[in-house]
Amino acid sequence: NAGVTQTPKFQVLKTGQSMTLQCAQDMNHEYMSWYRQDPGMGLRLIHYSVGAGITDQGEVPNGYNVSRSTTEDFPLRLLSAAPSQTSVYFCASSYSPDRVRSPLHFGNGTRLTVT
Amino acid sequence: GESVGLHLPTLSVQEGDNSIINCAYSNSASDYFIWYKQESGKGPQFIIDIRSNMDKRQGQRVTVLLNKTVKHLSLQIAATQPGDSAVYFCAENWGYSGGGADGLTFGKGTHLIIQP
């Protein structure tokens, strides 16, 4: 049981480049989400999904797109990378859409640097 | 959750002592609380959770206490070991509501340092 798998682990982009951060879970979780973690800022929600075909914006969605075509996968796309998007990105999943009584399971993150 | 500006609060304890990490939550409607441990270079790892109808819950070497009156949560780690060195943060959950709010808020964390 791999849990939540994120790729790549590290990425360096130039300003204006685009890329996709991959996230997959094998726990049949309905809920998946993306966070960014910056020093002193804690975890901030970018986008989330309560099931295949359903996505919603979180606290800091600008500059990012997501899609959820399958239960297992929830990729995060950076449309035109900016230095302000330098951060560590975490994907997470849990069993139920409202996540009551259901903790999030996190991947080990993607460390992104935009120059 | 806890909020201390640009720097994480730090708790330094001697190996073998008990550690207590505190968290103030903000939403009176929160009914589920979780503690996570994050080691350097890794993702947050679930430690223990507690529902709002409970005041205390125990796990292996960890205890979570919930005081709803003052909206306070604490994590107690017994007989702290070097492997306990990490950032610990709490999360409060008031349930999914949609429309940009997924019903979960994380604290900014406390860095637990274990002294030999």
Image: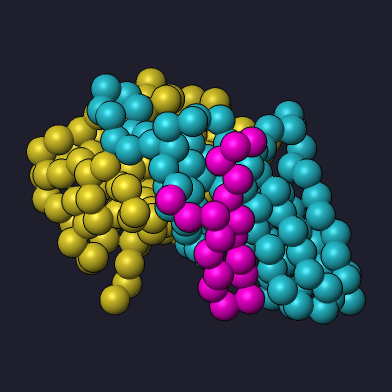
Residue A66 quadrant: top left
The chain displayed cyan equals B
Residue A45 quadrant: top left
- Quick check: is A59 in the magenta stretch? no
Magenta part of the chain: B53-71
- Quick check: is B64 in the magenta stretch? yes
Residue B80 quadrant: bottom right
Where is residue A49 shown, x and y percent of the image?
23, 39
Left or right position of A68 against B76: left
**Which colour is chain A painted?**
yellow
Where is residue B32 shown, x and y percent of the image?
42, 47
Relative depth, front residue between B34 and A71: B34
Where is residue B34 shown, x and y percent of the image?
49, 53
Residue A5 appears in the figure: yes
Relative depth, front residue between B36 and B52: B52
Relative depth, front residue between B24 and B104: B24
Relative depth, front residue between A113 and B27: B27
Measuring 29% from the left and 76% from the top, which residue is drawn there?
A1
